Image (cartoon, rainbow, N blue to C red):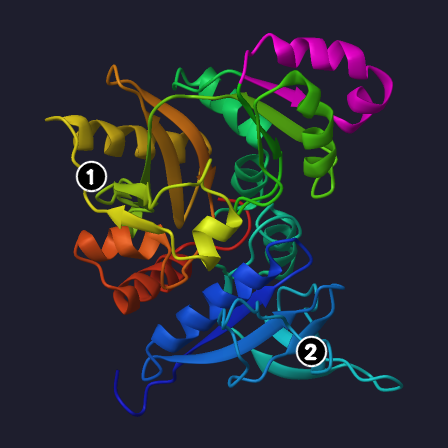
Amino acid sequence: MSDASPKIRVAVVFGGRSSEHAISCVTAGAVMAAIDRDRYEVVPVGIARDGRWVLAPENQRLAIEDGRLPEVSADGQALALPFDPASKGLMVVEPGRMPATLTEVDVVLPLLHGPYGEDGTIQGMLDLAGVRYVGAGVLASAVGMDKGFMKLVWQARGLPVGRYVMVGDREWRTARTAKLDEIKQLGLPVFVKPARAGSSMGISRVETEDDLTAAIEAAREHDPKVIVEAAIVGREIECGVLQGLSGGPAEASLPAEILMAGGQDFYDFETKYLDGATRMAIPPDLPPGAVAEVQRLAVAAFEALDCEGLARVDFFHTPDGRWILNEINTMPGFTPTSAFPQMWAASGLDYPALVDRLIRTALDRPSGLR
């Protein structure tokens, strides 16, 4: 880009109201460190835990240090996004004064994980404002966030999923015994999860029926809607997917296998982010043809939900060679240890090039209905 060419202005939005606030901050820190500043001008926008939008300092600590998790401070300059497609800007909000335009933005990188960000809420707001953004639209974001509806869509497309039971808030309050009886038909062990959370928050492995109620209550601390899944014996394999360029077909990365050092019951939050007890094999040691098959299924899962931009699709590979879809993440983590950027790096697309592609893909598509 020549010196006379204007830089593309990118608002990097991070933090948010969900339990994945800290991981969103870590993701944003890694992305902002890698983004090409000769091509892009970055506007860091933090969302505090109480939902306030602030202009975040670029030198803010956005990494996990000595087990301490980063957080957006609500003390920064208050911001708002006007719902005016002609504006395409961020507004400074000060008590007792009329809002003032801070800057126009060309594209938003909504690096938000979990509810109130990854679930279609901010996507709908950006569509109303007429601002382009990276990642899936409203419907794909919402369905991809809700593990129950995600699996229903995949089942309707004939894609392989495991056995599960959904536990809604009303069902749990009014028909608890019947719902527990339904869950018991899955056998043991089971995994109890918040239906609309990620980063392994609120997950329990349940070995006895006596522990079911406590596990569901623990998951309900993150989400009143809970999913209970039958345990699947198999290797945990992940695969990255990117929207095709210039209207082309979606592309899948080399897959990765999560390898735990030992002693963990499952891939929980501490194992994933804090204790360094995991590593990844990219590509994993799989039978002939298995890599091509998991890539095909990852793209099929992406397209079944009408995803855009990017996603990480998680699988189980069973001892008898079957692939079972576990879940999809429409805004996967970009932390230094995250699988998504590592899989694409192994596939020939390094971190800065990956970020650049996501921004270019978002700029190439229209805002609003498509």
Q: Does the magenta stretch include residue 105?
A: no
Dot placed on the residue nearer the N-terminal end, 2 or 1: 2
Residue highlighted by disc 1:
284
How many numbered dots are placed on residues in this image? 2
The amino acid type found where label 2 is placed reads Met
Which of pointers 2 and 1 indicates the residue nearer the eye? 1
Q: Could you say where residue 236 lies in the image, as x and y percent from the top left?
A: 34, 34
Q: Could you say where residue 14 lies in the image, as x and y percent from the top left?
A: 57, 66
Residue found 72% across the figure and 30% down from its top:
214
Q: Quadrant of residue 15?
A: bottom right
Q: Nearer the viewer, residue 139 or 233?
A: 233
Q: Quadrant of residue 37?
A: bottom left
Q: Which SS does the magenta portion mostly show?
A: helix
Residue highlighted by disc 2:
91
Q: Could you say where residue 318 lies in the image, as x and y percent from the top left?
A: 30, 20
Image vertical order of residue 70 relative to residue 276, above or below: below
The amino acid type found where label 1 is placed reads Pro
Q: Which of 339 and 247 is in front in this view?
A: 339
Bounds of the magenta segment: 164-188
In this image, 149 relative to 271: left or right? right
Residue found 73% across the figure and 25% down from its top:
213
Secondary structure of the residue carrying numbered label 1 = loop
